[in-house]
Image (tube, grey):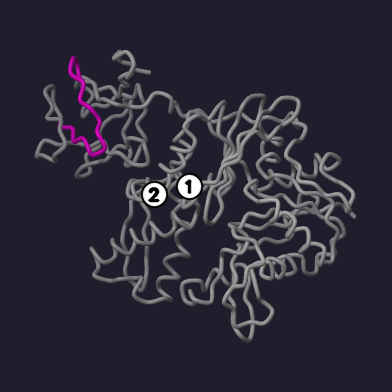
């Protein structure tokens, strides 16, 4: 029987074998005196039963006592064991490889092996998830892997040549999916209160419905601008710009920690699901959900070890199947909007732009304003005003479009174009892309 792979990311714990996904669960548990819910069933009631919900047991895997009314649950190790048992139930597993975040300590890895030893399968290897991702898709060079989880993002720097070698691991707290969800839920609730006088967080069941819609909003806003939230017969429209402004502080935490991306950023599916995050760096690639399992299967001879001598693999051969990274031109940061011989600075706020050959440009909306340029998540986005559609690179602009250095804007085809430029801080020269 072939070896199965268990990926321990609490946002999406996955079990795969032979390239097929067998089971998946988020790292949630609802602990009750008479029973226990795990995975999606617990997540879907997390807002309804917050005091009974635990989603920390993988992030803080240990044997410390926790408050629990259930005698089967004494500590996080028990919850991890119970979730593994449920994940693997009915799968007839023999040998298993664990793909584990690089943030796991030696004590946590030892505890994981102890938990796995009590399960009906044999652990034959453990590998750093980020190293597996890089081995699967990175060309030669220096890369940074973002492994986003529920509560944090693990930042791993790797060097890729004939082999993939882990060089450094860092954890960015408060920069996980839940931080984004909490901020977005507050934004949605505020919009409902403002436009409908309905507070969706006043009732736990409605709040849960709100949270259940957030992943769909994120997916929608990767390609489209507006999204309609509907709750209890009421609805509000939310734009991509609002979303990006809301999660900007989380993105900024990651950008500060990853100021030098080397030859590119590799993003796990959770990080790749967030609109606009990839554009924070010049070159990125969002791996698909099969990348880690595929790498583990392809490189199994280099991961598999005798059961009595399991060690944590942080170096693997490169598979020589590199992907093409998406280029974002993030190296040239837009700083000004150039019209003829005048450059208008782009600040952290919004710049309103009028029409005509002598347009009114400034931080305040005026009767002449045709469109605006607004900051969100470290980028500049087009905002339409009163349905007016300016031309971006001589094509009709769209709400929320990301503006890059070198882009041209004009209110009408017969007007002189404005150009998004970058002023180089060390020389003062203007760079038009």
Which quadrant is the C terminus positioned in? top left
Front: mark 1 or 2:
2
| CB contact under 8 Å: marks 1 and 2 | yes
* Residue receiving disc 1: 274
Give residue 15's position: percent from left, percent from top.
Answer: 73, 57
Q: Residue at left 45%, top 70%?
A: 208
Q: Residue furthest bottom?
A: 34
- Classify 10 Å Cα crowding around label 2: few (below 14), some (14-19), many (20 and above): many
* Residue receiving disc 2: 247
Q: Is residue 243 above or below residue 280?
A: below
Does label 1 or label 2 sit earlier along the sequence?
A: 2
Give residue 223's position: percent from left, percent from top.
Answer: 45, 44
Q: Residue at left 65%, top 46%?
A: 102
The residues colored magenta run 339-354
Q: Residue at left 30%, top 19%?
A: 423
Figure quadrant of residue 191:
bottom left
Of helix, strand and loop, which mostly describes the magenta segment? strand
Q: Which is more toward the observer, 351 or 253?
A: 253
Give residue 156's position: percent from left, percent from top.
Answer: 60, 39
């Amino acid at each position: 029987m072939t070896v199965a792979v268990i990926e321990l990311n609490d946002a999406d714990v996955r079990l795969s074998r032979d390239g097929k996904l067998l089971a998946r669960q988020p790292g949630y548990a609802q602990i009750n005196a008479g029973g226990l819910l795990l995975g999606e069933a617990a997540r879907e009631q997390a807002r309804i039963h917050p005091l009974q919900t635990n989603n920390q047991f993988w992030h803080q895997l240990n044997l410390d006592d926790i408050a629990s009314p259930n005698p089967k649950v004494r500590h996080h190790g028990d919850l991890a064991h119970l979730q593994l048992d449920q994940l693997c139930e009915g799968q007839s597993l023999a040998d298993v490889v664990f793909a584990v975040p690089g943030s796991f300590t030696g004590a946590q890895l030892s505890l994981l092996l102890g938990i796995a030893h009590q399960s009906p399968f044999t652990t034959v290897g453990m590998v750093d998830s980020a190293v597996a991702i890089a081995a699967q898709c990175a060309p030669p060079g220096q890369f940074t892997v973002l492994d986003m989880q529920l509560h944090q993002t693990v930042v791993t720097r790797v060097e890729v040549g004939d082999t993939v070698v882990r060089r450094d691991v860092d954890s960015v707290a408060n920069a996980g999916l839940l931080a984004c969800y909490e901020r977005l839920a507050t934004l949605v609730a505020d919009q409902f209160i403002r436009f409908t006088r309905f507070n969706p967080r006043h009732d736990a069941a409605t709040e849960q419905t709100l949270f259940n819609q957030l992943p769909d909003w994120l997916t929608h806003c990767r390609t489209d601008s507006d999204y309609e939230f509907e709750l209890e017969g009421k609805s509000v429209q939310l734009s991509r710009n609002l979303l990006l402004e809301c999660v900007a502080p989380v993105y900024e935490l990651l950008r500060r920690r990853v100021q030098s991306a080397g030859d590119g950023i590799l993003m796990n599916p959770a990080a790749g699901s967030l609109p606009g995050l990839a554009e924070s760096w010049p070159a990125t690639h969002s791996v698909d959900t099969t990348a880690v399992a595929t790498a583990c299967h392809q490189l199994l001879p280099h991961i598999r070890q005798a059961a009595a001598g399991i060690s944590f693999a942080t170096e693997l051969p490169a598979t020589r199947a590199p992907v093409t990274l998406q280029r974002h031109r993030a190296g040239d940061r837009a700083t000004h909007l150039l019209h003829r011989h005048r450059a208008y600075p782009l600040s952290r706020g919004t710049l309103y732009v009028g029409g005509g050959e002598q347009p009114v440009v400034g931080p305040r909306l005026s009767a002449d304003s045709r469109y605006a340029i607004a900051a969100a998540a470290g980028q500049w986005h087009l905002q339409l005003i009163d349905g007016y559609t300016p031309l971006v690179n001589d094509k009709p602009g769209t709400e929320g479009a990301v503006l890059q250095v070198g882009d041209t804007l004009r209110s009408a085809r017969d007007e002189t174009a404005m150009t998004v430029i970058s002023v180089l801080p060390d020389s003062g020269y203007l760079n038009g892309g």
